[in-house]
């Protein structure tokens, strides 16, 4: 088992889950083509989703200090096809420079993998029962932002420092809300606008 206690693993697992949900929610506010913020959110969603999939389903550890669910004494289960396809797309289109990037992006469907990840998060909380902190970062509402007070804080992993948080005004939980108060479900039709990450013609 890699170094690290249960509290450390839970904190970083919670951060991955929080960031996956937050990127999913915030993407509905950045739909314009050529928006670098949208591209960054797509990449965040993709990488955090892949990290969660590997944590819950991948027995092989590329590095000896990598964590997986077994470090929380939770049995690994075979990776669902939807999550395997997601990981493959992330590896080819975002995590590495590959020939796949010259092709038009396939449609990404976070809505298909999110319930699978939610099920695994729920299993962790059920297995650990009272060991999950009451203020666990994994339960934090999606769409929160930190008020950074120094340049150093901007370079520090959000899960490792104590910083004040404030909710974004246009978010309620995981759903984006318009100025009129009408909820808009976070939908994504592709991993990035034309001419963005991995899109045809962007090489």
Image (tube, grey):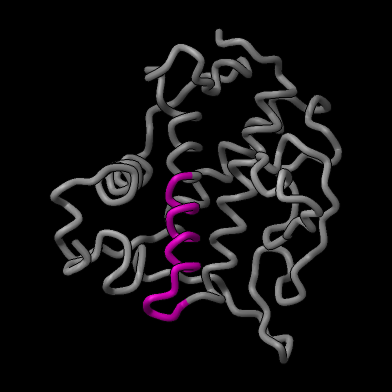
Q: Nearer the viewer, residue 157 or 82?
A: 157
Q: Is residue 155 inside the magenta stretch? A: no
Residue 99 percent coordinates (x, y) = 13, 50
Q: Which corner quadrant of the image does residue 4 belong to?
A: top right
Residue most extreme to the front: 151
Q: Is residue 112 above or below residue 15?
A: below
* Quadrant of the snapshot with the N terminus: top right
Residue 185 appears left or right of 125: left
- Identify the residue at horizontal 64%, vertical 70% (top origin): 175
- Identify the residue at horizontal 73%, vertical 59% (top origin): 145
* Quadrant of the snapshot with the C terminus: bottom left
- Identify the residue at horizontal 17%, vertical 69% (top origin): 201
Residue 95 percent coordinates (x, y) = 33, 43
Q: Which corner quadrant of the image does residue 186 belong to?
A: bottom right
The stretch in magenta equals 31-47
- Identify the residue at horizontal 52%, vertical 68% (top origin): 27
């Amino acid at each position: 088992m890699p170094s690290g206690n249960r509290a450390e693993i839970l904190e970083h697992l919670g951060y991955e889950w929080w960031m996956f949900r937050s990127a999913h929610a915030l993407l509905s506010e950045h739909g314009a083509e050529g928006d670098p913020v949208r591209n960054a959110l797509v990449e965040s969603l993709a990488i955090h989703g892949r990290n969660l999939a590997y944590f819950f389903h991948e027995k092989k550890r590329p590095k000896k200090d990598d964590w997986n669910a077994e470090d929380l004494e939770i049995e690994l289960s075979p990776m669902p096809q939807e999550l395997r396809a997601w990981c493959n797309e992330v590896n080819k289109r975002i995590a590495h420079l590959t020939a796949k990037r010259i092709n038009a992006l396939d449609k990404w469907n976070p809505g298909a993998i999110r319930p699978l990840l939610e099920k695994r998060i729920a299993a962790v909380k059920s297995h650990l029962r009272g060991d999950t902190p009451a203020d666990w970062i994994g339960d934090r509402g999606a769409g929160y932002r930190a008020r950074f007070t120094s340049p150093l804080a901007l370079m520090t992993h959000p899960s490792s420092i104590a910083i004040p948080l404030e909710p974004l005004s246009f978010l309620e939980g995981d759903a984006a809300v318009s100025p009129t108060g009408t909820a808009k479900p976070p939908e994504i039709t592709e991993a990035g606008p034309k001419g963005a990450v991995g899109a045809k013609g962007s090489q």
